[in-house]
Amino acid sequence: MKYQDKDEAIVALRQSVEKRLGSGVNTPSEFSLLERDIKRVAGRSVSASTLMRIWRYISGTTHPYTSTLNILAKYAGWHDFASFCKGGDDGGSDDVLAPRISVLTALAPRDHVLIRWSGDHEILVRYLGNGQFVIERSQNSKLSMGDTFTCSLIIEGHPMYLDNLVHQNDPVRCFVCGSSNGVHFELIEH
């Protein structure tokens, strides 16, 4: 274990979770937001009250179950809590273990991907094949319905790079979604 003890590892895991969320967790509403985001990303639930105890916002047990720590580690981009402890805070493993879509092998033409970043930015894209997408819906983004781009890999919690972007009458260019805190995606198969 890279950490001196389990308590030190839990403190580091809390920091990694907050980094993944993109903000600190200090109020009941922020714990509720984190609870929902963990369910969305990791596919498992951790109640807001459990999160409050782990963050020591409310009193209670300070030794959470390993299963709970595994869910938090998965949310932060690690395979499980043991992997997090071995890898420490260098972030080396999250690139490999983070949920991702390898476009050329995972998508079929007409599949849709919902992509969100920076809180309220969102695009719904349809895969055309050969790494090319068309935007079918755009909310709070500089991108527009009908824009096309190429992309070969979408990694949860990392920036998404749109290449060969054709946007209205502008010259072809590149665009980055989620440059600060990465993107979150949801695959909607046809």
Image (cartoon, rainbow, N blue to C red):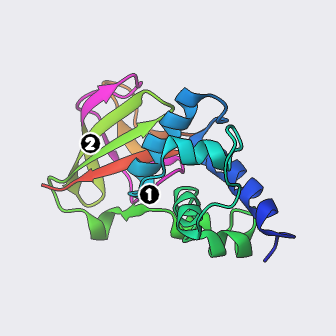
Q: Is residue 181 visible?
A: no
For label 2, the SS is strand
Looking at the picture, how far across and down is residue 181, in whole percent?
Answer: 58, 41
Q: Is residue 92 visible?
A: yes
Q: Residue at x 39, y 45 (%)?
A: 164
Looking at the picture, how far across and down is residue 163, in whole percent?
Answer: 43, 47
For label 1, the SS is helix
- The stretch in magenta equals 136-162
Q: Earlier in the sequence, mark 1 or mark 2?
A: 1
Three-letter residue code for mark 1: Ala
Is 150 a magenta residue? yes
Q: In which quadrant of the rendered image does the C terminus lie?
A: bottom left
Label drawn at residue 125: 2
Q: Residue at x 62, y 50 (%)?
A: 17
Say which residue label 1 marks.
42
162 or 16, which is in the foreground? 16
Is 34 a magenta residue? no
In this view, 89 is above or below 27? below
Give left or right: position of 41 versus 94: left
